[in-house]
Amino acid sequence: MDASHAAAACQFFSARNPDQLDLRMLYFEKKADGWLWAPEPLPETEKSLREWSDSVQAKRWQDEWQPLLLAECPELESLPESGAPAEEDARKLIDSWLRAIRAGDVMAALRHTARLHTPESTATLLRNLGYEMTGARRHRQIPTVTGIRRSGIWTTVATQADPDNTALGPFYPVIATPAGPRILLEIDLVASPNRSRDFLNKTTLERLRKVNVPAADALQKLFAEHQNQNTEAGRGVTSP
């Protein structure tokens, strides 16, 4: 920035490629009315800020943009041994999360999440966030909470995205963190009769099992109960 030229480096979020750097420079020029955005900056504007944009920001952001983006998404060195979040707290968390996703508010959505301390956690979380954002655009209304279960360290919240299909909807694992209840978004589970989705659910649980076997087994049991309930509902079976 100088007396008459300024620039801002912005990371653009893409729902299709949310884990990739998409750094764009926004240029501003000082006019009589104040600082104005210049969508087509003058050559002297770009020239005066090129060294800063190319040598400083572009290189630094390659390594720093994801930690900055996830500053309010706690990284868990390990899973807690006990203490599942209360049902009401989990419901409030998911209700707020669904509104943030519907609004397309990336930063607000991330404040509802936590991530594991594994090499693939950040990329997986961001990709799943992209899927959630994309999915929200396909539905006319915000999904509804259809069931909450607690066991061990988990409080799981089932949702229904399509009012005409009770067997389809994300199943969110909520866990206690020092920052409060959070969604472990990289563990994406969706109740669906689709075989491809069933494979993805199993892969997700196997990834969790590499981190903590008892936690993965407990979550798998909760998810199986949810799937069985949906299957019975779809067949018109009433549990005793």
Image: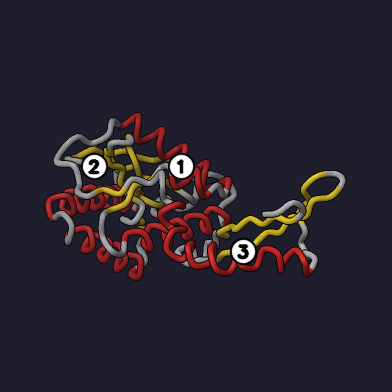
Residue 4 point in image, percent of width and height: 77, 53
Above or below, 42 relative to 135: below
| Circle nearer the viewer, 1 or 3 | 3
Q: Could you tell me which secondary element the residue under label 2 belongs to?
A: strand
Q: Give whichever of discs 3 and 2 has the lower sequence position.
A: 3
Q: Residue at x 78, y 69 (%)?
A: 43
Instruction: Please indicate, yes or no, whether residue 157 appears anywhere in the rendered image.
Output: yes
Residue 214 point in image, percent of width and height: 12, 51
Q: Could you tell me which secondary element the residue under label 1 belongs to?
A: helix
Q: Could you tell me which secondary element the residue under label 3 belongs to?
A: strand
Q: Tell which of 206 and 64 is nearer to you.
A: 64
Residue 33 point in image, percent of width and height: 85, 44
Q: Tell which of 113 and 99 is nearer to you.
A: 113
Q: Which residue is drawn at 30% across and 46% down?
A: 173
| Circle nearer the viewer, 3 or 2 | 3
Q: Which residue is drawn at 64% across and 62% down?
A: 25
Above or below, 40 relative to 67: below
Cα distance between the residues tagged 1 and 2: 17 Å
Residue type at the position of mark 3: Arg
Residue type at the position of mark 1: Trp
In the picture, measured across the screen, residue 138 lies left or right of residue 165, that is right
Q: Mark 1 points at which residue?
A: 97
Q: Name the residue under label 3.
A: 24
Q: Mark 2 points at which residue?
A: 154
Residue 159 point in image, percent of width and height: 41, 45
Above or below, 13 relative to 158: below
In the picture, measured across the screen, residue 147 lies left or right of residue 84, that is right
Residue type at the position of mark 2: Trp
